[in-house]
Amino acid sequence: DLPAAVTVYEVGPRDGLQNESSIVPLEVKVEFVERLVAAGLPVVEATSFVHPRWVPQLADAAELVARLPLAGPVPLPVLVPNDRGLDRAIEAGCTHVAVFASATETFAHRNLNTDLDGQMAMIEPVARRAREAGLDVRAYVSMCFGDPWEGRVDPDQVVAVGRRLLDLGASQLSIGDTIGVGTPGAVTDLVGRFTAAGTPVDRLALHFHDTYGQALANALAGLRAGVTTFDASAGGLGGCPYAQSATGNLATEDLVWMLTGLGIDHGVDLGRLVATSTWMAARLGRTSPSAVVRALG
Ligand code: HMG
Ligand code: MG
């Protein structure tokens, strides 16, 4: 049985724009987020309070969120890696934050300049302080299906890291296929390991990159396993600057097209979304990699 409704968690302004070689002007970012909200996305991850030297594309995070409707009905979460990031997000008035960890040692080092234990030591006070301040905390775990340096990733290692993040008080865990190597059988297996370990399926989200063209098939496997939150990026923007060979996220339009066909409620106005991605592609000077955007745009 498939779920009757899903939450499409939009990550384009963050996961998409963090990987653009050009720096998108602040005005364009503001309009991008506003248009995504107007297209009916129920949550839009806006930016990251990471070190500006690590991700210069999002160095204007504070200026951006100052221009956004943080108290509106649509949550606009921001990524925070550490205490400094949380301080900046709270100062900016954010109400929803997302922490992120790696399932592998190598990526913990590459992405967070620490190791598996060090990332937990970094995240623990962030999650605790954020919750004390009344913020919602989402958690990501990266490299859940494969890692460019370590190869295959042990799914039990993913479950161990993911459950530690939930134990820190994250409301939801997003399982990331950072480099897009996962396939549907591995998705079914991994979700099953989480639920067998006692994690309610409604606390899981799936975050696919489409590097190997598997993202939509993987999303269908996730739906069949009972997952009801899927991360996606308008127009298929995205990647990760610290993961070689990570390309765009699952395109929101491709996901929405499939959900509509399956009769699953999502609340997104596909026409407005395609218009937004077509507009953004023109700002970036290239066409969208999304098949649905190309078909309808
Ligand atoms: P570090 O260099 O080890 O930081 O970086 P540090 O703690 O040693 O501090 C060094 C200096 O940076 C200090 O300044 C800090 O104040 C400053 P100084 O005293 O030298 O003047 N600093 C900061 N400044 C602003 N904002 C901050 C901040 N933190 C420290 N937050 C750090 C450690 C975690 C900061 C760094 O590694 C970092 O920013 N990493 C982020 C990398 C990133 O954003 N990656 C992409 C997001 S993850 C992703 O895309 C995957 C996902 O999509 C899911 C999936 O696909 O799997 C979520
Ligand atoms: Mg990602």
Image: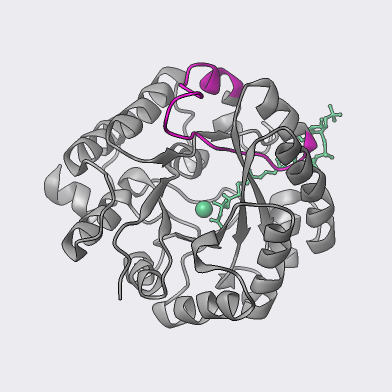
Q: Is residue 4 left or right of residue 70?
A: left
Residue lying at 73% horizontally and 60% vertically, measured from the top left = 167
Location of the N terminus by quadrant is bottom left
Q: Position of residue 89 (x, y in %)?
A: 66, 28
Q: Main secondary structure of the magenta part?
A: loop
Location of the C terminus by quadrant is top left
Residue lying at 56% horizontally and 76% vertically, measured from the top left = 195
Q: Is residue 103 left or right of residue 193?
A: right
Give whichever of 77, 128 is nearer the camera: 128
Q: Position of residue 12 (x, y in %)?
A: 42, 41
Q: Is residue 271 left or right of residue 91?
A: left
Q: Position of residue 40 (x, y in %)?
A: 29, 37
Q: Is residue 178 visible to the viewer in this orientation of the structure? A: no
Residue lying at 52% horizontally and 40% vertically, measured from the top left = 18
Q: Position of residue 57 (x, y in %)?
A: 55, 32
Q: Quadrant of residue 3?
A: bottom left
Please state the extent of the stretch shown in magenta in the rendering.
Answer: 62-83
Q: Is residue 184 above or below residue 17?
A: below
Q: Is residue 283 visible to the viewer in this orientation of the structure? A: yes
Q: In this view, which residue lies farthest toward the left?
A: 296
Number of marks present in the image shown: 0
Q: Is residue 133 left or right of residue 71?
A: right
Whether the magenta-drawn stretch holds residue 73 is answered as yes
Residue lying at 60% horizontally and 55% vertically, measured from the top left = 140
Whether the magenta-drawn stretch holds residue 221 is answered as no
